[in-house]
Amino acid sequence: MYYSRSENQNGEKEELSTHLKLVSFLTGTFAKVFGEQAAGEWCGLYHDAGKASKLFQDVLEQKEHGVNHESAGAYILENGKGIKNRLLAVVVYAHHKGLQWYIKDELDKSFIEKDSREFRQTGRRFSVSGKEQYQEVLHFYKENIKPLHKVPLLINNCDSFYKFLPKMLHARMLLSCLCDADYLASESHTNKAVLDQIDSFMPDFGEMLKSIEQYREKIKIASSANPVVNEVREIVFQDCVSAAKTRPGMFTLTAPTGTGKTLALLSFALHHAIYNNQDLPKFHRIIVVLPFLTIIDQSVKIYQDICKSVLRADSTTKCTEETKLMAERWCAPFIITTSVKFFEALFQSKPTDLRFLHSIAGSVIIFDEAQNIPVNLVGTTIESTKVLCEMFGCTVVFSTATQPDYSKRDDIHIQCLEIIKEPQRLYDKIRRVKVGWEINKKVQLVDIAERMQRLFSVCCIVNRKDHAYKLFMELQKISDKEECFYISTDLCKAHRDRVIEEVTRRLKKGETCRVVSTSCIEAGIDLDFANMFRALAPLDSVIQCAGRCNRNGRKTGIVTVFIPDEERLYPSKEYEVRAMCVKILADRHEIDINNLEHIAEYYAEIFAKFNKDDDTLEKAIADIDFEQVEKEYRLIKNTGVNVLVPYEKEIKLFEELRAEALTKGISRVWMQKASSITVTSYQEEQLYNICEKALVRGNDGKLQKAENWYILNDLKFYHNGGVGLHFDEDSELDYIL
């Protein structure tokens, strides 16, 4: 008798045959969504073949350790009669360590007829080695497990500039099915109720449509927008409803900012799912992908008013015991996540990072503010979404006011259907702002502060935090402090939310409000100023900035674009190049931000300079090097370090978390609790001298210093009155929001 794991709390062991059959069934069920049930069943049935050995049974008895049990099943799938499939072998081999394509040599070692003690893979002995032991494993399968007769016919008919991109995503998707199945089966050994949660939701898209209509009626009644703006919002909504009755595929939605795309896109997704699910259930969920954590809260609130079963899936998600499994598996009809969480999952190699990936199959996916994909990753990113559509039954929508023309890229080959029937007509109807391009000479920030002081509803967005700080301090010298506000990611989330709440209240009441901000409010934050200043930036950023001005079209807003008279103007070289493309355009002719031809001309300049992704990423894909691809594909290259800050309005939470971090050590749950009072900083040298280091428990159970986590105790370095985390001790910011 072979067992798969040790005794549970009831003293019960799990027979290996029982575990294999359950994992095979679950893996096949998950893979069935994209037409590969047989492939899933084979992976599940052979993933733990190496446990049918004396050596592994000794591991369960704690007589042995350091044993590789994954190679046996992989070898059988690569070499066995009637199967011989490298992709399935790779998936099985990866279910503990992670994906590797070139495994043949290692598998062949396990088949050499010698004592396995002589052959080690990174210090781990093979649980099955030699022809005789493999025969014993096959005999176990013959006697205990019903054989699978349906040989997998793997579908891999998607072409890409990045030749092996579809194959790699294929492997990740199957590994996701296997890992999720294996984890669920393992959890069920101690908690059988976990299997009841696998398909505990049934998406009621029709009911969600009714909720949208009710929500829209409430908005219409409360709206103070110009009738023309409301007319454009209605056009966008109805075009989405019409376009939804189309077969699955790739779509774009091109419409000005502030035209109700949030509701319209959700309506498209629901109508599209219902239309395509008439004959056979196809779409299981809707996924909304947002570019930044800073804008996710507002979107979640809107969607939760429409659908109560919204699952928020990002690095700050706070889970209850009831929602923990849903968040790990993305097991919900409606999911909101971030670009980092979604896209990086398509390029991971480790099983734990891939668990939820298969839940993306059979989804309608909405990419909001799609223009924010870094130009050095846009090829692999967009081509991966094509693979999701062509191989895994998805529909994707790229929504933005500044739609990139991907046909200008050599490495992107997609065909998208535009949802809006006459996009340019909408831009012509909704000219809400006048843009002044003051970019022929540099302007002192003190001059911008003086111009802001003369206005009552104004916001200035700059490209760097040091510019924002300098401008804010100049503005405070000549304005009433209580009328001036600072917004950047140097404010923790709780602090930033409170500032935005007060700014929103003042704008609605018509009270004086002057805001200095970095680009963190450019997208997804529903603010409406009469005047905007914008430091020269990429055109999509300038247009997003204009979207915070005269949002409801009551009278013409004024947007002024300028170049600060500062030594360092941009946060990165790529950002600078994109901003300079705007300057090139402006030198040719006056830029009209409502002219789609001008936007297309801008992207032609961008893609002429960035014509394909980084060579290192392209090479890693060509080499089918999963680990290197994961390393190279990073939407945010420098993630900085995390600082727990003593924001005064949440000081009790700070003290509680600080005590826990210094005594028990931090954990994933601790990080989730800390997300509202955490700041990401790139100034680790200063932090090292003024902060405590958080602790974490190592593999040996002992506390040690945690990487990338600091605790700030000194209140003089967190300015509750304005600029958040800052190392200028002389700042006089004495009021608290």
Image (cartoon, rainbow, N blue to C red):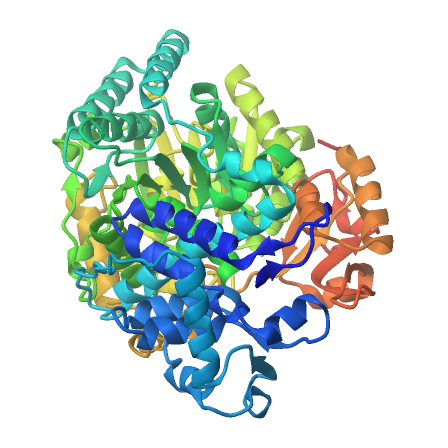
| 44 or 610: nearer the viewer | 44
Task: Give percent across and percent down for residue 138.
Answer: 41, 71
Closer to us: 262 or 591: 262
Who is closer to the viewer here, 82 or 671? 82
Picture layout, residue 651 above or below residue 699? above
Asked whether residue 227 appears in the rendered view, the answer is yes
Name the one closer to the observer, 242 or 38.
38
- Residue 275's spot in the image, x, y percent? 19, 27
Q: Where on the picture, by quarter, is residue 108? A: bottom left
Whole-percent x and y of residue 90? Answer: 38, 70
From what the image shows, is residue 425 above or below residue 194?
A: above
Question: Residue 682: where, in percent of width, then height?
Answer: 62, 62
Asked if residue 3 lies left or right of residue 395, the reply is right
For the view shown, which residue lies furthest in the front direction? Answer: 143
Q: Quadrant of the C terminus?
A: top right
Residue that appears at 37% across and 83% down: 104
Question: Can residue 731 be spotted in the picture?
Answer: no
Name which residue lies at 23% across and 37% down: 253
Quadrant (top left/top right/bottom left/bottom right) for the N terminus: bottom right
Tell me if residue 513 comes above or below residue 591 in the rendering: above
Q: How many marks can you see?
A: 0
96 sits left or right of 555 in the view:
right
Q: Is residue 372 above or below residue 101?
A: above
